[in-house]
Image: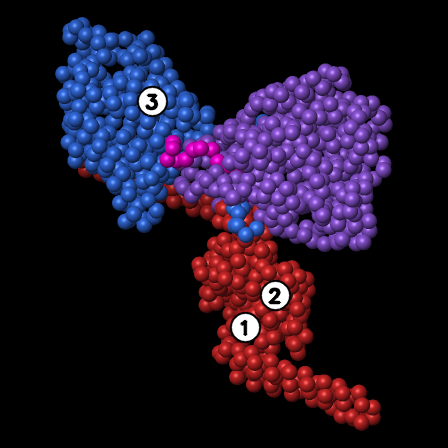
Amino acid sequence: MTQTIIWTVAILSVLGLLLALILFWVARKFKVEEDPRIDEVEKVMPGANCGGCGFAGCRAFADAAVKAPNLDNQYCPVGGDEVMQKVASILGFTVAAKAPQVAVVRCNGSCANRPRVNEYDGVRSCRVKAALYSGDTGCSYGCLGCGDCAAACQFGALSMDPQTGLPVVDEQKCTACGACVKACPKHIIELRNKGPRGMREFVSCVNKDKGPVARKACAAACIGCALCQKTCQHGAITVTDNVAYIDFTKCKLCRECEAVCPTGAIHGVNFPKELDKEAVKKRIADRKAKAAEAAKAAEAPGLARNDAPKQAAAAPAAEPETKKKEVANG
Amino acid sequence: MGGVHPHDSKFARERAIEELPLPQTVYVSMAQHLGAPAKPVVAVGDSVKVGQVIAEPGGFISAFVHSPASGTVKGIAPRKDLAGNPVMHIEIAVEGDEWDPAIDRTPDLVTAIPEDKAAILDRIKACGVVGLGGATFPAHVKLNPAPGKVAECLILNGAECEPFLTSDYRIMIERPKEIVVGAAIMQKVLGGCKCVIGIEENKPEAIAAMSAAVSELGYAGMTVQPLKKRYPQGGEKQLIDAVMRRQVKSGGLPIDVGAVVQNVGTSLAVYEAVQKNKPLITNVLTITGNEMPADRQHNYLFRIGVPLSYIAEYAGGVPDNAAKLVSGGPMMGKAIANLDAATVKGSSSILYLTDAFTRRKAESSCIRCGKCADACPMGLEPFLLNRLYKAADLDALEQNAAQDCIECGCCLYSCPAYIPLLDNIRQAKGQVMGVIRARAAAAKAAAEAAKK
Amino acid sequence: MDKKYIVSPSPHIHADISTTSIMRDVIIALCPALLVSVLAYGWAELLVILVSVASCVLLEWAVTRWMLKKPSTVGDLSAVVTGLLLAMNLPSSIPLWIVFIGAVVAICVAKLPFGGIGQNVFNPAITGRVFLLVSFPAQMTDWTPTSGFIKLTDAVSGATPLSVLKEQLKSGHSIPDYLQATGQTFESLMQDIGGSAGEISAIALLLGFVYLLIRRVVKPWIPLAVLGTMALVAAIFHGINPDQYTGPLFNLVTGGAMLGALFMATDYVTSPMSTWGGVIYGVGIGLIAMMIRYFGSYPEGMSFAILLMNCAVPLINMWFHQKKYGRA
């Protein structure tokens, strides 16, 4: 009995020792030399492996960052500036701060706004549906409502609203990794700057049909009337292919476009106060009247020659002030 | 290998072809064929005659488009196709029915075949003939094999294996001689290869009519071969296998095994183009359904560009019990999302299916019965491809030949758990094809770079 | 278009087939054998069948509904099939609470934890049976015939032919000796087959299987491979030493060979999907079953053979694929 135990212990010990030696030798022999900074960088990464940066995962990002001459072409949308600063300090680079972004769904074709004209009976997948036809509403550009974006989101930031049939972004959870942007076959979702305190303006429609056609399909469609473009004082709005687009780098959040939009296709979110459309419209009308007066004055020969340039110079100077007030007033 | 046996439901088989009158407006699509869309060559306000060229090919694989009616061009603008997607259309307001004088409209059969091959090909191209079997591939491209490739056998596809459809059957019954002359023309263009006309066994009248025409006209090397009734017997690759006992390699073309496959409808179009100088402006379309009274089913000779809704109205309107409208057969046809869409060269039917007949049942778990794999005519394993697609494993999808899928629908048809296999595999195929194309392009670029 | 028409990808029609219709066909195919067993063993057998089916269905419904909180899959009738197959593997004299335990193992251990229908690795009915066999060996091998409605068998011994012979061989007798001593022949042994419901009538089972073949529910390759292998192995061994080893026909019609080959090995979920994979799987079952019968301590090996080969199915599926068009 004792002998059996001794033998067992001995054999197992020897076996263990042998295997350990083999492991040790293999580890030595096949060791891959890696830049230790890769590990360091990986440590500060969020570790979501979402692929939002365009690399296969956080380690691939770290590997590329270590090898790259600078960090201009790399950005971790999940970690944002904080993480990028850490990465930069490890690698001795400098990075410029980037505004935080958020996914924005540019379609407001809810069940109420956009009546269904046929019944889809295939697999519940936007990709499949988009490949098959224009969708079960009259709008061939809008959200298909099968939730590919929500399925693509790793952070649980997107969900389908059963009431409207549209995806809803949870801004707290959204990391702007861009997975939903890639997943949407209709290219409805866009990454936009979050804006000060989350305030932003955007056109919630991508319908390129002509006004009447778009309107017939959806009550909330952008009809390409360009009223917003004419109203915007900052050149932030362009209308191409019958649909308006607000450049978030130029938008000053004055909400005038939102007030003039006849279909309510322009949305402002996270503003502390509700938009008083009439007040804003009145403001625009006053400004126009003033401009018309000024133009008249300029037309009158000789009389206002000296005043005109002054007015022109004064106008832009006055603007930021009103802007600030507007933002404050909301 | 594989295949399924749906009920053939050819209820409209006894209905003779009727000519459909012209509506007030026709809309001619610029994307009626496989390949690049055609480019309009008329302007708004131009008056056009029947058979006049109104658009020219937009690339190597593309086709001429002709006016199906005489009248005035009212507009050249995007219009929704049957899937609801905007496609460039030429709108023509119909005035009278004045034909291009160069077209021979007599019913006389012309059996003497022109000698010059290049001239025949030119005529086929100029008349905008495309394959009418479903893919609408430009006929002149297919009939002009790349240098070094030799066609041994022209296979004329009269299988019409899709249930319900009877347009090919009707032309084989009513115009067998023209089809045979068309086949002889294509034989000549291909360098005098033999020709096999394949027809499914469930159409003995068509087999008899075509056999009689073949023996009467006496062209060399032409035979009629009855085929087993099985879907998709009329699939290009399946037909080559059935007739020649050869299989086209994955990614290859039929010509690689010496085969050229054309539909009987295409053969008729070739006849009309070459012998009568008539461009492809008409085709035959079946109106049928699974619960339609016999007198409401029709086979119409229609002008290409007539709206589907016009045909439906002419035939007595959409039946009340129709829940799904399909253009094409029930296995591979497209559901019509927009009935106002115009007919195109490849339109072959309007199919009215009832709710109980066509609605998909709720999906349940795969029970691994393997029926999809048994049914797949390409020998693929749809259950596996479906799983790999969900796992987004593109490498494995390619290894398991997702790109070989012919989208025949047998897998979904035979799945007892109603799993949307083809819906997903079609996507998988697209993704794998994208990878293959990207790789080929990269290899080409690398080879060119190496040359320099 | 005012009416909302349906739009979907092709195909727009579907074969007249569903999981439920397949299971219904299997149930119909089992009917002849069930009928024979009820006639032979009477009310007791009927009770075993009813309890088995009812337990399986109830358990499946209760577990999916209350524990997994998923839509119930009772409607597909797969639980009924499991219940029937389990019952056919049990002696009619078995206490009903044991039947219930068998159902618990089949549904709550072998089937649902793996993900329910289509996901289970092991055939639920066989898992249930094997569990009972190793847990309650006395009750599971007590083949005292209960009184039937008609007298199909003269057997009073209450043992199956396979177990009778096994006992004899174990105690050192040879088969001819035993037959001579008791004045029996193989033929009479086969006629006097005692055993579980599924074992007593090969003809009824075959009849049901032919129905499945006609309905194209199953293909014959797996059963052919199983039975062919068993016959071949038996022929070889019997040829070498008839004293020690029983012959091919005897092996095919006794024990669970028919039931196993025709209805258990052909279970979709736990068998390979390709034709050649199925053949390999069948050959494996045949070999293992015969090895157990000849050399193991159990008289019968079908259940173990099938369970063992179930393990190999994923591997077989990996190696054997359908022949693809246009690829060598």
Q: Chain of mark 2?
A: A
Asked whether residue B56 appears in the rendered view, the answer is: no
- Residue C175 versus residue B252 in the image, above or below: above
- Chain C: its colour in the image is blue
Taking the image as shown, residue B332 lies to the left or right of residue C175, namely right
Q: Quadrant of the C terminus of chain C?
A: top right
- The answer to whether dots 2 and 1 both sit on one chain is yes
Residue C13 magenta: yes
Q: Looking at this view, is A252 or A2 the one in front?
A: A252
Instruction: Name the residue that disc number 3 marks.
Output: C208
Q: Nearer the viewer, mark 2 or mark 1?
A: 2
Instruction: Name the residue that disc number 1 marks.
Output: A268
Range covered by the magenta-colored residues: C9-22
Residue A134's x, y, as percent?
A: 59, 52
Residue type at numbered disc 3: Gly
Instruction: Name the residue that disc number 2 marks.
Output: A222
Mark 3 in CB contact with mark 1 (< 8 angstroms)? no
- The answer to whether dots 3 and 1 both sit on one chain is no
* Marks 2 and 1, the one that precedes in the sequence: 2
Secondary structure beneath label 2: loop
Secondary structure beneath label 1: strand
Judging by colour alone, the chain drawn in purple in this rendered image is: B
Residue for point 16% across, 33% down: C96
| Mark 2 vs mark 3, CA separation in Å | 66 Å
